[in-house]
Image: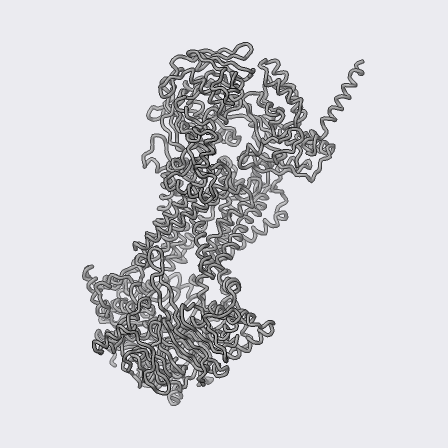
Amino acid sequence: MFVYFTRRLLYLIPMLLGISFLIYLGLELTPGDILSYLLPPEAIADLKPEELIAMREALGLNDPFIVRYLYWLGGILQGDFGYSLASGVPISKLVLERIPATLELSIAALLFSTLFGVILGSISALKRGSLMDNSLTVFGMIGVSIPEFIFGLIALVVFALQLEWLPVGKRLMPGYDSYWDHMPHLVMPAMVLGLIMTAGVMRYTRSSMLDSLNKEFIRTARSKGVPEWRVNFIHGLRVALIPVVVLIGFRLPMLIGGTVIIEQVFQWPGIGDLFVNAVRGQNYPLVMMISFLSVTAVLFASFLIDLLTALLDPRIKLE
Amino acid sequence: MSADQKVLSVKDLKTYIYVNNRCNKALDGVSFDVYRGKTLCVVGESGCGKSITASSITQLLPKLSRIESGEIVYHSERGNIRIDQLERNGPEMRALRGAEISMIFQDPMTALNPVYRIGSQISEGLQYHSKNTLAQLKQTSIDLLRQMGIPLAEQRVDDYPHQFSGGMRQRAMIAMAMSCKPKILIADEPTTALDVTIQAQIFELIDELKQRHNTAVILITHDMGVVAELADHVAVMYMGNIVEQGTVDDVLRHPAHPYTEALLKSIPILGKGKQQQITPIQGSTPDPYQRPKGCQFEPRCPYATERCQTFPDSQSISATHDALCWHSEKVLSHA
Amino acid sequence: MPSQEKILHINGLKTYFPVRKGLLRTVAAHVKAVDGVDLEIYRGETLGLVGESGCGKTTLGKSIIQLVGAVGGQILYHEGEQTFDLLNLSPEEFKHIRQKIQIVFQDPHSSLNPAFTVFGSLQDPLKLYGVKTKAERRKIIGDLLEAVNMRREQMDNYPHEFSGGQRQRIGIARALCVNPEIVICDEAVSALDVSIQAQVLQLLQEIKEARGLTYIFITHDLSVVEYISDRVAVMYLGKIVELAESEALYRTPRHPYTQALLSAIPIADLDRKSDRIVLEGDVPNPVSPPSGCAFHPRCPKFKSLSEPEKQRCMGESPQLSDATQLTQPHLVSCHYPN
Amino acid sequence: MKIRFLLPLVVTLCFATQLLAMPKNSNPLSDSRVRQAIAYAIDMDTIQETLLEGKAIVADSHIPNGPFKKPGLPKYSYDPDKARQLLKEANWNSSQELDMVYYYSDQLTVDLMTAIQAYLSDVGVKMNFRKLEGDVGAQLWTAPKDPQNGPSAVKWDLAYGAHGPLALQEYFSRYKTGDMSISPADAKVDSMIDVLTSTADIAAQKKIFFEMEDYMQTELFTLPLYYQQAFIYESNKLNRNGGIYGNPQYNYDWDVTKWTVEPDANGKMVMNTNTGPMEFFEHPWFNPGLFITNKVLFDRLISCDGGLAPTRPKMAKYYNLSKDAKTLTFELKNGLQWHDGSAITAEEIKWNIELALKVPNIMPIFKTTFSYLEGAEAFMNGSASSVSGIAISGNKITLSFAQVDPNVLLTFTQWAPLPRKYLEDVDPAKFQQHPFWQNPVGSGPYKVQEVKMNDYLIMVPFENFHEGVARIDEIVAYPSKDNDANLVKNASAGSLDYGFTKNVADVKALEEMDHMRVIPADIPYTRMVWFNKYAKN
Amino acid sequence: MTRRPTRLDKKFDLLREKTEQGTLKAPSSNRALNKLASNKLAVLGLAFVTIMILASVFAPLVTQYDPQKVDLRMMLKPPSADHILGTDKIGRDVFARIIYGGQISILVGLGSALGAALIGVSIGAYTGYKGGWWDSTFLRISEVVMSFPQIILVLMLVTILGQSLMNLIIIFTLTGWGSLYRLTRAQMLSLREEEYVQALRAFGLNTFTICFKHILPNALGPIMVNITLSTAMFILQEAGLSFLGLGVPLNIPTWGNILNVAQDLRILQNYWWVWLPSAVTISLFVLAINFVGDGLRDTTDPTMQG
């Protein structure tokens, strides 16, 4: 078990190296002077042109590509993510400010979609071929076929503007920044994102559950005379959950990506919003760094999912 | 063989399977009896309906299938129970499963749930059929495993199925099946996935348990060798019918159905050397959706006559021996 | 009838599969699937290769046609005066020798490509071995189908239109299409129903006689092997433990494992109930086979041996040697054969 | 006699027209007939009525309507037949495709482009449009090395954009030879611009403006499309208490200190607005009044009216511009304070002007004003350590100009001094990136209380503001660009009390809301099409 | 005591009756096609997709209007006999724009899916079959690409490459090949152990022939499913990018660009015909493709019976 996880963790290193290399390559390909986001603006201010040249030399900006890359990587390892082209603010600061918002939204959506997806998917599988199953399937399909922003906009018009049940967007209201004050703001974006994801989880749970219900051990369980709920849930769902958890792991990138558009619709001040603005403003270092951080987040999250899978599946745990 | 020794009688059982929007008459009128402490071997080639027979008895049929007609009567101590009339997974059926009639399956790897410990899977049935504390349940699991000849049962009871070898898994399956001391044990090809040396171990075990608990065993197999070694009674199946049944002596020494006869001639027998003659059965098993009109074996049968175009009646050869063939006399005399 | 002409000489063949373990998935050990096998095969004979699952019989077969790579030893193929080491061939030799040894597989469902007709599946090998025109190829494939008791026209059918027995026949036809000398039958009848099994066995016999083939017949079914083989080799944990004329091996098995194996088989003959020797335990893990004689932990005879004898079994690996000194060699790998 | 007098004139005029109409190089757009044809082909009146929903004024000159605009300038009203005829005269090659670029990313621009494309195609001119990406400025305004013959240093034929300088001169001064990417050297234009930028005499200015406008519009150097309006919107809760309306993109005497809003449940007056900071506070030297923070956090030396005409001193106790317009004197009020309580000194103003000379992204009229100071050149090229034209004595600042700048007072109505102690170390090239702009300290009626960058900004009255403490308890600004994409959403949800927009679609939506009012304001902002008249290679 | 008849029992009775009367028609030889045909949703989906593709390819025959034809005097007119879906903000015919917009949207969706398939399938098939160094290299590369949140990767590439139709297809291809590569590779890994493959190897056939000619056709089922589903995904992504203003340049009509106007709340609330038809078209088209993909999946997946 320990070896398995250590190996899984070690495995992240070459992945992150590869990704960081790609990111740096992208950074070099984009126009702009690398120096301007390697140094804080105040530092550049103190330099004369000849000092700047010396600085470039000292910073290794004239070094071979690979050396420059290593310097850059070294900076990242020490928490130096560079500076935003637009404001000169350290990227780490910008990102840190936004992380709680995105986490809040994506975790809420994840919990919502997992809970409902698994419940509805199981019901669908158990009632296979029934009206319930068919309508859930069709609704699920419709759910993944509507562009998410349209879904979001319609929800916004209906619930915020027409019915006035929920705020129109944003995350914080001045003076109301306790955790519970976020809740009314969180409901709509989390629901919209969650519902879209629920469809996928539901469909997958359904097929995984069907698969599991077709397994021999289900018949074994029945042959022991245990009640149906036990057969279906203790035996069927328990085993069906393993691939569902794996799927959720696979969908993490989608989740992080999914917030990009939803954050735009609901003025949610998260990473996605920062990212889109950086793309629009051609703030290359910020674009690249957010990409890098989101990949890193995905990788670590999928590592956590792996842990969870291993806890669910003794076959992995004891490998 | 007195009637009170009968634990199960099946009469004219018809089970049809409705997969792919078609109707496969997997069992088309099957009758047999099972006796306390005796082994009935159901033998036949793949697709003949032997496994469907087994799962009809416990109503563990695939979803898209149905018992159409006939009777399955379990002669319990509390009187006769018409299994075919019970709701598939209803409480009455569940009370029988595991407690009175239990099953072991072909592949112990897939038949065990990979995510639960062996011990809890063994005692799960017991949990529902008796009132035991968790500690008692665990102790029972350990005892059962020990009885099945698994070394270090105290430790292995906490293992997961994939930590067991194939033979041990099948022993665990048997422990599970025997946990409530059932009256009938149905073993559906229990050794097909195992090596011969392991198969021998498993058969020894089943035989021993049968002796000890006076359990009736229904053993589904395709191996005539297994039949010869283990069976008290034999039922030979072909295309959803029992074409011949009787004691093992009746059937193996005096086959009265051309199919049984041909089957026995087509297999090489160990120890008979290179000189032995084997005679293949001509043709192949018909498509279950395009069955011959009368006798199902007619197209491949060397004895076939025009009469075989009508479905044969069961011919009684002796008190214990029946065959489903118009020409059984001829077959008997030929052998 | 088998001649005394050696066609294939396998010498100390080893096929190992790495087992990766630990943090960096380094190769921690090897599964010694085939661990030093010596075997001579004579032109025109049928050599049966038996053993339980995991004993290495299939790997041995696949190593011979190099579907899996051997890590050591030699496989010498004799053709007239020439000898080729199959593990060290030049590209031209390779193409020449490839067609000499062919294989028939076990599973009738996966042995044919579901996307192609029989003709489609079989024509590429023929093209490779120089049959240029389509008409020629059709003729050859048609002839082959007839040789396996099928109809010529069936070459245009897809695998799902055939029954299991028919597919197995097509598998045989495919192996024959390049006129091999040796055919390895890897569990060729194991997946078939008994009634079909007999048909295929008979077909294999007929073809062998008609074409003068040499068979290496791999199976776990000892009855079938007895019926079809001239000589039989018994494998246990990657090694051959007994090798003899079929008659001799079945009548007087010398190795305790062979004895146990034979006794464990249920016989479909009520008059011949044997005394069963039930082996204890399971086959050991081939990654770390027991020391000395790999069979000693399960050996029924081992228990009755004296202490120094036991030490020998546990410490010294027995060699395959002739135990009887009769006219026909009867090789056993046991310190204390019966 | 009359005839004799007129004839040469007519001949000359005809000749001149003929001469003017000739293509000046291989580029057909250098032929004014082609340019005029394009102007005739576009039905601006219909566009104004429909696409712009009447929320704009069709333009017939660069500069907006007013006293400086010559009456009766040529109008190119929709006349497709005339367009076709002009094209025919100019031998227009109908297979040629014009490449039109733009840089706005809104839907209206695309719709407008599409409409123009349709009109042009109607008269047989093919046009394709595309949005510029990347360094838009360089792609638009790179001037060719040879200002006479080109070839052009930019790729496009037509560019859609807008120009909205504070000072009217700025509309034309950019056409000076060698400064721009589109017009080959034209001695007449150059001489007019020279006059335009050097006199502070209103009458002289007016004359040359008329001349310039006429020349540009007849020649159609550039095609003015429409004058944009800005629309101020307010919720019914907001009361300006007599504060005037004016150009909302700039600073004027709007008396924000007098404003009130309906108190909320807690009795607190909170005004919600937009254009709060997203990543940083935009500094007020580039856009002096576009964002709420530019307006209320910083104070100016002089105040002006809604049309941006200077009216009264503000931070200054008084100001005085000499008759020759070459000396400007201020005296600062006593006891002026920054938000942190430290004093605002005259010395600090000098330092501010010197810094402004070095900051590259600064409003052009500021730059012009400051660079006309005596000794500014020497300071900028490093040969002097300070600007000799700025003299300090106590609270008094005297600015001496080497050259007359007609906009000198305008500059000081918009330009805001900044506290030296926070910005002493700033790199002028990276002015905006200085940490100061994360939480600035200003001198205006409101000061920053809490910034949650990208969530909200809370500003509260500055207790020591020299014109009295503001009445609204809190101004809450939600982050947005000046073109707030979520305006309609937030306004209809009641979370906007004040703001302004130039987006026509938003205005329509705002007008439909019962709780909002919309007040249009004229702004000097002309949408136009630039013709690239250089030869292309 | 008899059992309650269930929903299935009725179906069983019918089947049994038909079988006994011999009226049950024998299934056609192509089971997969048959199964697809019996899936009503898939057939409906296929019909819709086909109609939409034909309509956009033959757009000039379907509508007399030019999608770019501006008529400012006709702006924002509700549906009428002349303009069956009304007109948009500059008086263009909404119906014509949707039909013509389909050309680009379908091109983006299908083109990117096919591009991704071309790359993913050829690399996946070859390296999956061959194994070894190349295989592990591409596996790592795909892991790197696939651990990017898709939209992040797309936007990152938009930043680097810029916005244009061609770039968008390239970007989608670059971001989408990973899943097809993984799928193909997984198929290859299992298929290469099939005995017919080993038989071909035993003949000494070259890797290329075995891999692409003999194995690949058997992996096509799931690949086709994936291509259809990717097409749907790319069409949705195009719409999403248009929403962010970073998709196909606005002057090219695509479903996403038409839908983009829904961001304007006034349009969203008051002029439904400007945005709703394209929203419905996108959703229906994607839904139809999903139905087809689902139907295909059921036919190619032998475990899904019933």
View extreme (bottom): residue: B333
Residue under the point 45% across and 64% down: E192
Q: How many marks?
A: 0
Residue A233 appears in the picture as rendered: no
Q: Is residue E232 above or below residue D282?
A: below
Name the quarter where the C terminus of chain C is drawn: bottom left
Outermost top residue: D323
The answer to whether residue E148 is above or below residue D457 is below
Residue B8 position, x and y percent, is 28, 74
Residue D441 placement, left or right of D289: left
Left or right side of E241 for A213: left
Q: Nearer the viewer, residue D43 or B229?
A: B229
Image position, residue E64 (x, y; %): 63, 44
Instruction: Confirm whether residue C46 shows in the render.
Output: yes
Coloring applied to the structure: one colour
In the image, taking residue C274 as reference, residue D112 lies left or right, namely: right
Q: What x and y, as percent, mark residue B172?
A: 27, 67
Of C88 and B284, the residue lying toward us: C88
User: Looking at the figure, which quarter contains the N terminus of chain C?
Assistant: bottom left
Q: Quadrant of residue A47?
A: top left
Residue E271 x %, y % = 52, 37
Does B26 sit left or right of E77 as displayed? left
